[in-house]
């Protein structure tokens, strides 16, 4: 029998980008009872709603993926909102899990919680050795406090809570809104739109010198479901591909895959964000046998293909 055969799972954010793939992975793994709460019916920023969710859904496994998040621009515009709503949602669902009871609580953190200047590759032992990069700090610190809460609740109440720290995610169904998106969907949209309209130039943020690591969303979903099955320790676990790339080289890869032949202008008045990001993912392999399988190039091609089809479908609908 599958681990999931007789277990009931709640996935907050299950209708979103990462969550939708986690729900699909759960179904493929044999989970037949999955509850996806919607914010219009259950506001997790309200403690009473969080407790009601546990009382009504009666989960065995609770996977908390819901987040208010965006790229550098969105973080700069919404520091207060991003701090409060992410902290409130997490505090409330973890407290509800303590009060009502749950077999396991799985919490997704963020790479933004790491210190601005962290030795590369980022190891979990360096998680507390400094303050996060300023533009991401309110969001990163809100998510970071949930690790403290889970560890404290494990010690005092015996709550089996685990904390996973994924690096920047990308893939089909991502957020391609230029006002709030992360770097990969933003660049894909800019190049695809510019190619379609014949625009001779694309503007990119920053200098291009900062480095990032990216994890394909289906690989992340696999990791979360595996960890829910097999991991039960208080220590955080990094989830990443282990492949570091500069934003400049990333842009060139996307430009080539889209086949955009215009020029690129770097707007150096815009921030680069954290100087470098690349994770040590050896703990995930050792603890629950997971490592990323999708190369960046393959993942980018899948994402571009999806966005291209999405654009066509949207134009068909609007017509």
Image: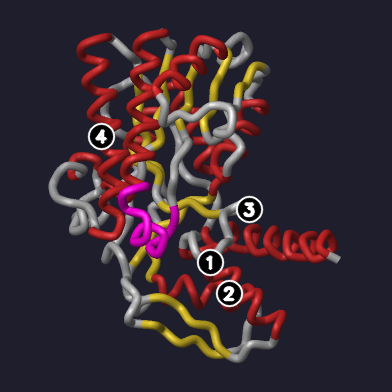
Q: Name the residue under label 2.
A: 190
Residue identified by numbered label 3:
172
Residue at left offset 45%, top offset 87%: 265
Circle nearer the viewer, 2 or 1: 1
> Mark 1 highlights which residue?
178
- Quadrant (top left, top right, bottom left, bottom right) of the N terminus: top right
Which secondary structure type mostly characterizes the magenta part of the structure? helix
Identify the colour scheme used: secondary structure
Relative to 257, is 102 above or below? above
Identify the mark nearer the N-term, 4 or 3: 4
Tell me if 33 is positioned left or right of 220 in this view. right
10 Å neighbourhood of mark 3: few (<14), some, or many (≥20)? many
Residue to which mark 4 is pinned: 145
> Who's the residue at 38% across and 70% down the image?
246
Q: Do the residues labelled 1 and 4 touch (CB within 8 Å)?
A: no
Residues in magenta? 70-81
Separation of residues labelled 3 and 1 (CA atoms): 16 Å
Task: State the separation of the CA atoms marked 2 and 3.
Answer: 16 Å
Tag 4–tag 3 contact (CB < 8 Å): no
Q: Where is residue 98 in the image (x, y as percent from the top left)?
A: 35, 12
* Secondary-structure class at tag 2: helix
Q: Which of 274 and 297 is in front in this view?
A: 274
Q: Which of marks 4 and 3 is in front?
A: 4
Disc 4 secondary structure class: helix
- The x, y position of residue 39, in whole percent, is 55, 33
Q: What element carries label 3?
A: loop
Front-lying residue, 68 or 103: 68
Q: Do the residues labelled 2 and 1 touch (CB within 8 Å)?
A: yes
Going 39% across and 49% down the picture, which residue do you hit? 167
In terms of sequence position, does the residue under pointer 1 or pointer 4 come before the other?
Answer: 4
């Amino acid at each position: 029998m599958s681990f999931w055969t007789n277990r009931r799972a709640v996935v907050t954010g299950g209708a979103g980008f990462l969550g939708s793939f986690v729900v699909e992975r759960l179904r493929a793994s044999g989970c037949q009872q999955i509850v996806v709460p919607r914010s219009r019916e259950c506001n997790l920023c309200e403690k009473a709603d969080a407790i009601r969710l546990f009382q009504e859904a009666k989960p065995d496994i609770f996977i908390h993926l819901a987040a208010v998040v965006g790229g550098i621009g969105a973080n700069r515009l919404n520091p207060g909102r991003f701090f409060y709503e992410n902290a409130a949602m997490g505090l409330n669902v973890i407290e509800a899990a303590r009060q009502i009871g749950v077999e396991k609580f799985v919490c997704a953190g963020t790479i933004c919680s790491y210190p601005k200047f962290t030795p590369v590759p980022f190891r979990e032992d360096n998680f507390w050795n400094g303050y996060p990069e300023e533009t991401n700090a309110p969001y990163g610190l809100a998510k970071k406090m949930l690790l403290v809460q889970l560890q404290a609740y494990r010690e005092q109440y015996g709550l089996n809570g685990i904390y996973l720290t994924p690096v920047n995610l990308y893939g089909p169904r991502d957020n391609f809104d230029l006002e709030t998106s992360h770097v990969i969907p933003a660049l894909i949209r800019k190049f695809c739109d510019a190619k379609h309209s014949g625009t001779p130039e694309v503007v990119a943020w920053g200098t291009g010198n900062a480095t990032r690591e990216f994890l394909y969303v289906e690989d992340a979903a696999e990791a979360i479901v595996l960890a829910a099955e097999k991991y039960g320790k208080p220590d955080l676990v990094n989830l990443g591909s282990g492949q570091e790339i500069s934003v400049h080289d990333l842009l060139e890869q996307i430009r080539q895959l889209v086949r955009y032949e215009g020029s690129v202008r770097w707007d150096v008045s815009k921030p680069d964000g954290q100087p470098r990001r690349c994770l040590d993912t050896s703990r995930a392999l050792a603890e629950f046998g997971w490592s990323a399988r999708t190369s960046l190039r393959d993942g980018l091609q899948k994402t571009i293909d999806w966005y291209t089809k999405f654009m066509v479908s949207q134009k068909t609908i609007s017509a």
